[in-house]
Image: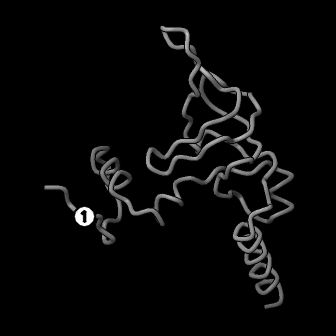
């Protein structure tokens, strides 16, 4: 029987339990797995280390076969916890080109698409919190 997600689970060294946690996590927690580091310029600009990866972000691949490639995000899959990039493809045996899924932890956001109101609110909230702590 499939066990429901446990909020009381803290950590485990066992990879099977880590995989189970990630696999059974609800959407609001899965979204947290989809964060990627920001470039140095964006870190200073937004006062944050990372942001959730969104469609139309420009990212740089930091690990793997496509290391160093800068591409635009075409799809973010919350079910598989993978990101698909423009121009990051592999040829199948039948000659068809397919996009290669990449983990968001292996990416760095170079330019963030700030047309999303929720994302703007997230950045402003962090800036306001920092100003508040400076005053104390």
Instruction: Point out the residue furthest to the left here.
Output: 1
Q: How many marks?
A: 1
Q: Is residue 30 left or right of residue 123?
A: left
Question: Residue 73, how many percent across, how many down?
Answer: 69, 42
Front residue of 15/29: it is 29
- Residue in view at x 34 percent, y 47 percent: 19
For label 1, the residue is 4
The C terminus, quarter of image = bottom right
**Residue located 74% across and 81% down the image:** 129
State the quadrant of the N terminus. Answer: bottom left
Residue 4 screen position, x and y as percent? 24, 64
Residue 46: give x, y in percent of width and height.
Answer: 81, 64
In the foreground, 94 or 15: 94
| The image quarter in which residue 11 lies | bottom left
Give above or below for 89 relative to 57: above
The answer to whether 96 appears left or right of 48 in the picture is left
Relative to residue 129, is residue 59 depicted above or below? above
* SS state under label 1: loop
Residue furthest toward the bottom?
Answer: 136
Residue located 29% across and 67% down the image? 6
Q: Residue at x 31, y 71 (%)?
A: 8
Tell me how the rendering is colored: one colour
Q: Residues within 10 Å of mark 1 (few under 14, many from 20)?
A: few
Q: Specify the quadrant of the image occupied by residue 3.
A: bottom left
x and y, in percent, of residue 70 in the image = 77, 33
């Amino acid at each position: 029987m499939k066990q429901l997600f446990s909020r009381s689970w803290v950590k485990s060294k066992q990879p099977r339990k880590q995989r189970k946690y990630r696999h059974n996590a609800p959407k609001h927690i899965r979204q947290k797995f989809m964060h990627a580091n920001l470039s140095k310029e964006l870190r200073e600009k937004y006062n944050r280390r990372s942001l959730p990866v969104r469609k139309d972000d420009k990212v740089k691949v930091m690990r793997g076969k496509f290391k160093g490639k800068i591409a635009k995000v075409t799809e973010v899959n919350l079910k598989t916890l993978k990101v698909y990039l423009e121009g990051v493809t592999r040829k199948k045996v039948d000659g068809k080109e397919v996009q290669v899924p990449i983990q968001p932890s292996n990416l760095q956001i170079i330019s963030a698409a700030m047309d999303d109101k929720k994302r703007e609110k997230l950045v402003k909230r962090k800036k306001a919190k920092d100003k508040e702590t400076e005053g104390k």
